[in-house]
């Protein structure tokens, strides 16, 4: 059983989100922490300067509220929204927060990422902890 589980969730809230959270609960030890993490892709500075002041922070807050609403009142799941490149940011967040298991969904692959989605593939190859991938 795991004590600190990370569940990365795509910004479009993949239909497997509920299943990933349920699997995280089943894999968790008593009093384990489960974190639902959404990574918002960083916007280049040359685009960000043309957006209204505070727009990006407001969008992040709305995304966090939307994710919290979609998870219901799950008291055992903490919601975190961060910015960055999805694969690298998931790995960095897991390392910085002593995650011992990552539970994530993978989309149907195309030729460029034949067995796993590109983000899931990167996480599986580079994670310093156990990774459980849903298909």
Image (cartoon, grey):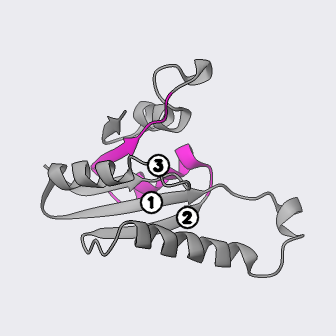
Query: Is residue 9 shown left or right of residue 86?
Result: left
Q: Please tell me which residue is depicted at 38% across the width and 52% down the height of the picture.
A: 17
Callout 3–callout 2 Cβ contact below 8 Å: no
Crowd around label 3: few <14 · some 14–19 · many ≥20 (10 Å): some
- Range of residues picked out in magenta: 84-108
Q: Which residue is mark 3?
A: 14
Q: Please tell me which residue is depicted at 56% across the width and 69% down the height of the picture.
A: 63
Residue 129: quadrant of the picture: top left
Give the label, 3 or 1, closer to the camera. 3
User: Relative to residue 57, is residue 107 depicted above or below?
Assistant: above
**Mark 3 and mark 2: span between their CA atoms?**
17 Å
Q: Is residue 102 visible?
A: yes
Residue 132: quadrant of the picture: top left
- Furthest residue to the bottom? 53
Q: Earlier in the sequence, mark 3 or mark 2?
A: 3
- Furthest residue to the left? 30
Q: Which mark is residue 75?
A: none
Q: Quadrant of the C terminus?
A: top left
Q: Which residue is mark 2?
A: 82
Q: Indicate whether residue 75 is drawn in magenta.
A: no
Callout 1–callout 2 Cβ contact below 8 Å: yes
Q: Which mark is residue 37?
A: 1
Query: Is residue 76 shown left or right of residue 134?
Result: left
- List x then y, in percent, for residue 122: 50, 34
- List x then y, in percent, for residue 78: 35, 70
Give the label, 3 or 2, closer to the camera. 3
Callout 3–callout 1 Cβ contact below 8 Å: no
**Mark 1 and mark 2: span between their CA atoms?**
8 Å
User: Relative to residue 44, is residue 65 depicted above or below?
Assistant: below
Q: Please tell me which residue is depicted at 87% across the width and 70% down the height of the picture.
A: 49
User: Relative to residue 92, is residue 106 depicted above or below?
Assistant: above
- List x then y, in percent, for residue 124: 41, 33
């Amino acid at each position: 059983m795991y004590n600190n589980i990370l569940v990365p969730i795509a910004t479009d809230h993949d239909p497997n989100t509920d299943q990933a959270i349920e699997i995280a609960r089943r894999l968790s030890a008593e009093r384990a922490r489960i974190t639902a993490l959404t990574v918002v892709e960083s916007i280049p500075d040359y685009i960000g300067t043309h957006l209204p002041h505070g727009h990006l922070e407001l969008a992040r807050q709305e995304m966090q509220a939307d994710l919290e609403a979609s998870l219901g009142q799950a008291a055992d799941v903490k919601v975190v929204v961060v910015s960055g490149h999805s694969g690298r940011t998931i790995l960095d967040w897991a390392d910085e927060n002593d995650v011992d298991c990552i539970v994530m969904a993978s989309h149907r692959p195309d030729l460029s990422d034949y067995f796993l989605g590109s983000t899931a593939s990167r996480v599986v190859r580079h994670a310093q902890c156990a990774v459980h991938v849903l298909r």
